[in-house]
Image: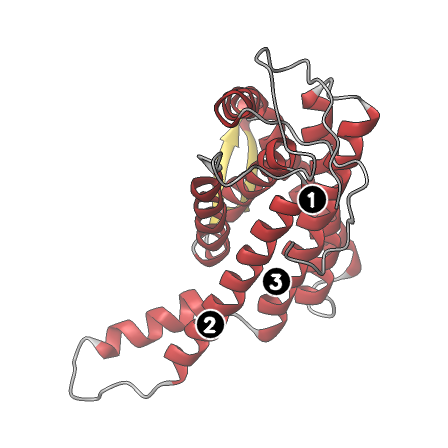
Amino acid sequence: MVLAMVPAPEVLTPLTTSAAGARSPSRPHKYYDLLLGGFVAVLLCSNLIGPGKTVAVMLPFALPLSFGAGNLFFPISYIFDDVLTEVYGYARARRAIWCGFGAMVFATLMSNLILLLPADPHEPFNTTLQPALQVVFGNTWRIALGSMLAFWFGDFVNSYVLAKMKILTQGRSLWMRTIGSTVVGELVDSIVFYPIAFYGIWTAETLIKIIIFNWTLKVAVEVVFTPVTYAVVNFLKRAEQQDFYDVGTNFTPFSLE
């Protein structure tokens, strides 16, 4: 993979990369590991804790709004993906996506194994804990499979679109790239997840309404966080002294290089 370097108007300090698009051993990435950890943490929490609760709020003019709590936090994983792709390039974002996917697979297997293990009948607390675990982590196989596949497809599409848009815009209009890639990525995520998880359970009309509403809500979260994204991206570009442009990149998702 060859990554070319061109000036980025959002960053005021000189940026440097090696000819191969990777830093030398003497110039390690300062914050990539922290971003990777944050990305995986947000992804797991939003998928394991958030989906089980429905929130009801009252909007102005007494308009009721109901949505899954996880929809407030899952889009933050897309912001991490945007930042990783924008600063470190598609290849580094690809590694993060595979880490997140692996963490989701492990969490799913671990939660199902814990539920299947026989509870000790001599421990009174198990009579309360086991049903609670079943409610929180006992997702059907369709929901679990849909969540993992939707994340995988959606995040790779998000990263690919942002990387391509960065080249087309020559590094200008970061907001256009982050929001535009999220519009496409979150749409793919919703189109993959909801039919796998709920087709045949919900009517087609309900399914379409839920897809449109949740997609809109997730994109809205991205829009609201745009100033934060700008601040983080500019900080990281200065701190890391780099800004990757994915010219000549092999965009296959099936690689860890």
Q: Quadrant of residue 166?
A: top right
Query: In the rendered view, would you say 127 is above or below 148?
Result: below
Q: How is the image coloured?
A: secondary structure
Q: Secondary structure at mark 3?
A: helix
Looking at the picture, which amino acid does disc 2 mark?
Gly
Image height check: is 70 above or below 111? above
Alpha-carbon neighbours of circle 3 within 10 Å: few (<14), some, or many (≥20)? many
Q: Secondary structure at mark 1?
A: helix
Of 67 and 178, nearer the camera is 178
What separation in Å lies between label 1 and label 2 (alpha carbons)?
25 Å
Q: Earlier in the sequence, mark 1 or mark 2?
A: 2
Depth check, front residue: 108 or 23: 23
Q: Please identify, in this view, whether the residue under mark 3 or under mark 2 is nearer the observer.
A: 3
Which residue is outermost to the top? 12
Q: Which mark is residue 148?
A: 3
Query: Callout 1: few (<14), some (14-19), or many (20+) C-alpha neighbours within 10 Å?
Result: many
| Label 2 packing within 10 angstroms: few (<14), some (14-19), many (20+) | some
Q: Which mark is residue 186?
A: 1
Which badge, 1 or 3, comes first in the chain's sequence? 3
Whether residue 212 is visible, yes or no, is no
Amino acid type assigned to the residue bearing label 1 in the image: Glu
Q: Which residue is mark 2?
A: 138
Query: Against 146, is 235 above or below?
Result: above
Residue 255 x/y as whole percent: 69, 58
The numbered mark at residue 163 is: none
* Element type where label 2 sits in the image: loop
Residue 198 location, x and y as percent?
Answer: 68, 65
